[in-house]
Image (spheres, rainbow, N blue to C red):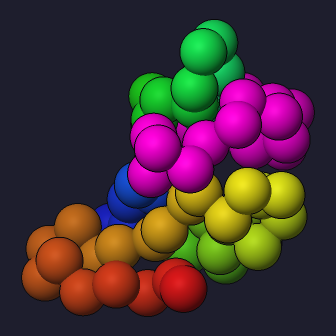
Amino acid sequence: MTYMPVIDESACLAHGDCEELAPDVFRVEDVATVIGTAPREQLVSIAEACPASAISVIDAQTGERIYP
């Protein structure tokens, strides 16, 4: 399965933790943007680490929300 992170741009405060943890997945300027994907466990871990709780993880095939 493929999992995708989704950024809530209205919640993102551009702390940069996501880019620091996964520079191949996130780019942070004014807000974070998704530029790639990673394994489910890594994406959930990064989402949990987001101080603004701005990252969700979804199953790309079904659209089911995996986190939060």
Residue 18 magenta:
yes
Vertical arrangement, residue 66 with respect to residue 34, above or below: below
Front in this rendered view, residue 65 or 4 = 65
**Residue found 76% across the figure and 73% down from its top:** 48
Residue 51 picture location, percent across and down? 83, 58
Vertical arrangement, residue 35 with respect to residue 18, above or below: above
Q: Which residues are magenta?
A: 7-25
Compared across the picture, whether 48 is left or right of 57 comes to right
Which residue reaches farthest left? 62
**Residue found 56% across the figure and 60% down from its top:** 55
Determine if residue 59 is in view: yes
**Residue found 65% across the figure and 21% down from its top:** 28
Front in this rendered view, residue 26 or 40 = 26
Residue 6 picture location, percent across and down? 40, 54
Which residue reaches farthest front? 10
Compared across the picture, whether 25 is left or right of 10 comes to right
Front in this rendered view, residue 16 or 36 = 16
Residue 50 picture location, percent across and down? 77, 58
Compared across the picture, whether 50 is left or right of 68 comes to right
